[in-house]
Image: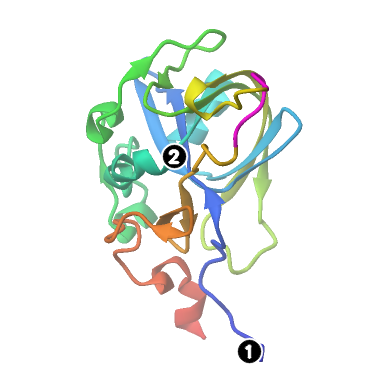
Amino acid sequence: MHKTIEPAIHYWGTPVVIISSLNEDGSANLAPMSSAWWLGWSCMLGLDASSQTLHNLRRQRECVLNLASVAEAAAVNRLALTSASNPLPMHKQWLGYRHVADKFAQAGFSPQASEQVAPPRVQECLVQLEAEVVDVRPFGAQDPRLPIPSAMVELRILRAHVHASILQTEHAERIDPQRWQPLMMKFRELYGDGAQVVPESRLAGGPEEMYAPWKKRA
């Protein structure tokens, strides 16, 4: 029997993407996120409007979408609740974020030179998508339950790098779904192939209601 509820978040299960971009000083930034979807060679991202990644995308107009697999779960967890913004926005301080300048070192990742964009790829990720920004627009401005200003970013994929280990044997241009095990984020927890892969998700450390101040007023 169905029950009508008002969940604090709607993170039903989406792939984890590690966005690499360039900061104003030329250093590389890494940001794990999961509000992303694709059609054709276009991608749409949903980002916090105050994030350093969005600032970088507006200025640099390019990035790399590094798709995490279950093998990168621990590294993604190390990146959780870190930000390149300094000082941190008030809502990120409240949620428990901390400033980290070197995200590659924090995660234990290795930078790999891209071919068509300036930001580096994450060598450990089996899928790396170089992309350029097509458009940036406000998102959710009419949603009273979205607690912070947000933006949607349309990207065009320029080049796709895929590790040979997840390609089909008989079709060199196709991904083998049995070999590719993307890291998924479901309600702030990390999953892969149906199983929880990080017992203690840093992102899920606080109650979900922290993301929904409107529930506290109800």
Looking at the rendered image, the disc whose residue lies closer to the viewer, 2 or 1, is: 2
Q: Amino acid at mark 2?
A: Ser
81, above or below 71, in the image: below
In the picture as drawn, the residue positioned furthest to the bottom comes out as 1
Q: Position of residue 217 (x, y in %)?
A: 48, 82
Whether residue 190 is visible: yes
What's the magenta region? 171-176
Residue at 59% in and 84% down? 5
For the residue labelled by badge 2, is the local secondary structure a helix, a strand or a loop? loop
Which residue bears the numbered disc 2? 69
Q: Is residue 28 left or right of residue 156?
A: left
Tell me if 99 is positioned left or right of 149 in this view: left
Q: Position of residue 172 (x, y in %)?
A: 64, 19
Asked if residue 66 is positioned above or below residue 9 in the image, the reply reads: above
The circle on residue 3 is 1
Q: Position of residue 35 (x, y in %)?
A: 57, 48
Q: Earlier in the sequence, mark 2 or mark 1?
A: 1
Residue lying furthest front in this view? 170
Q: Amino acid at mark 1?
A: Lys
Please tell me in which quadrant of the rendered image residue 38 appears. top right
Q: Nearer the viewer, residue 79 or 161?
A: 161
* Dominant secondary structure, magenta: loop
Q: Residue at x 44, y 66 (%)?
A: 211
Say above or below: 174 vs 143.
Answer: above
Q: Quadrant of the N terminus?
A: bottom right
Quadrant of the rendered structure where residue 93 is?
A: bottom left
Residue 189 visible in this rendered orientation of the protein = no
Within 10 angstroms of label 2, few (less than 14), some, or many (20 or more) residues? many
